[in-house]
Image (spheres, rainbow, N blue to C red):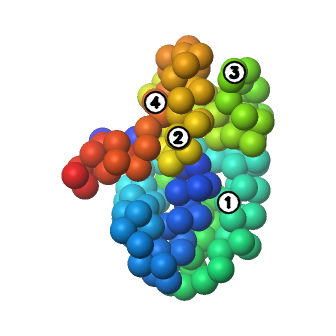
């Protein structure tokens, strides 16, 4: 079963650098991004797209993963076979930082069941503390939970 997901750009950035850093976390992130981009539906808003492209420009080592993941982003945006474009997401109020608003708004824009995948512990804590995921019918999880969801653990 395909899931709808919003990928916080922190994990996306780490995945793009994985073939150069070869850290366990970055390689795990790359594996998750690979599966998400090829099997599941990516929820993207204009602000999320801007964040991804900014992170791509910040990647210190643009190896194969960075090229592949950005190519797939472009393909998903063009074909919309594995993406859901939301041009005007609702603005979700809560304890989360303004720097995270774009991913929270995108996850909440889906009617139900979207997964916001992030390694940002303060974001996950803020969302849990004020009940934003429950109120807006999305799930927020870290890399380990995403791996389990995708059958990688």
The residue that mark 4 highlights is 139
The residue that mark 1 highlights is 52
Return the x and y of residue 99 as percentages of the image width and height.
75, 42
What secondary structure is found at the residue carrying circle 3?
loop
Return the x and y of residue 30 as percentages of the image width and height.
43, 67
What secondary structure is found at the residue carrying circle 1?
helix
Q: CA distance from mark 1 to mark 2?
A: 19 Å
Q: How many marks?
A: 4
* Left or right of 64, for residue 25: left
Say which label, 4 or 2, has the lower sequence index.
2
What secondary structure is found at the residue carrying circle 2?
helix
Q: Compared to 21, does 153 lie above or below?
A: above
Q: Residue at x 65, y 80 (%)?
A: 60
Q: Compared to 50, does 26 lie above or below?
A: below
The residue that mark 3 highlights is 94
Q: CA distance from mark 4 to mark 2?
A: 14 Å
Say which label, 4 or 3, has the lower sequence index.
3
Crowding at mark 3 (Cα within 10 Å: few <14, some 14-19, many 20+): some
Q: Is the N terminus in the top left, top right, bottom left or bottom right quadrant?
A: top left
Say which label, 4 or 1, has the lower sequence index.
1
Where residue 152 sits, quadrant-wise, is bottom left
The residue that mark 2 highlights is 121
């Amino acid at each position: 079963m395909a899931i709808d997901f919003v990928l916080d750009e922190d994990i996306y950035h780490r995945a793009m650098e994985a073939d150069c850093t070869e850290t366990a976390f970055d390689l795990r992130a790359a594996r998750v991004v690979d599966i998400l981009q090829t099997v599941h539906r990516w929820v993207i808003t204009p602000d999320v797209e801007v964040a991804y492209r900014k992170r791509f420009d910040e990647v210190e080592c643009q190896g194969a993963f960075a090229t592949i993941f950005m190519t797939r982003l472009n393909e998903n945006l063009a074909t919309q076979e594995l993406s859901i474009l939301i041009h005007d997401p609702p603005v979700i109020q809560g304890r989360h930082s303004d720097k995270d608003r774009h991913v929270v708004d995108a996850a909440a824009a889906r009617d139900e069941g979207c997964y916001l995948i992030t390694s940002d512990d303060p974001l996950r804590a803020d969302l849990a503390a004020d009940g934003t995921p429950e109120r807006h019918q999305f799930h927020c999880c870290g890399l380990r939970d995403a791996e389990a969801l995708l059958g990688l653990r």
